[in-house]
Amino acid sequence: MHRHGYKGRKFGRETDQRLALTRGLMCSLIKYQSIETTLARAKEIRRSTEKLITLAKKGGLANRRLIIARLGDIETADLLVDVIAPQIKRDSGYLKIEHTGFRRGDNSEMGTISFVDEISLEKKAAKKEAK
């Protein structure tokens, strides 16, 4: 049998559970700028999160709505579009994955995924005070 056209990792979950897992990891990454998870999960969410960042950098209402639909969280989408995306100066490769060792319980490889550029969330507080 061939494996043509099968993209992504399954993580031993069904489709709805896998989608919820990736959405939650992407939202946590955007909110906290760095998360520690298994290496396979980090590599998988890097693909979809970098696409969302590219959409956020382009701007526009349609792209904002696409981001909201893919994240499922309006506050996180607004944070990405209004605060994080304008601070990123590079064209691609927004995220980095660093190996952090092995998990104690099942010895799975762990990694930290974070933004390559330094991101400050100070603009969000300044905007609220201005309003």
Image (cartoon, rainbow, N blue to C red):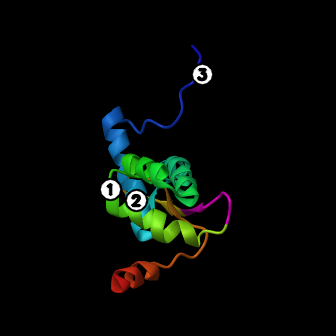
Q: Position of residue 111 (x, y in %)?
A: 51, 60
> How many numbered dots are placed on residues in this image?
3
Is residue 93 within the magenta segment? yes
Is residue 124 visible in the rendered structure shown here?
yes
Mark 3: which secondary structure? Answer: loop
Image depth: mark 2 or mark 3 in front? 2
User: Cβ–Cβ below 8 Å for labels 1 and 3?
Assistant: no
Q: CA distance from mark 1 to mark 3?
A: 33 Å
User: Cβ–Cβ below 8 Å for labels 1 and 2?
Assistant: yes
Name the residue rendered at 56%, 69% in the picture.
86
Q: Is residue 49 left or right of residue 75?
A: right
Is residue 130 depicted above or below 116 in this figure? Answer: below
Q: Nearer the viewer, residue 56 or 6?
A: 56
Q: Which residues are magenta?
A: 90-99
Name the residue rendered at 37%, 41% in the picture.
19
Q: Which mark is residue 60?
A: none
Mark 2: which secondary structure? Answer: helix
Label 2 packing within 10 angstroms: few (<14), some (14-19), many (20+): many
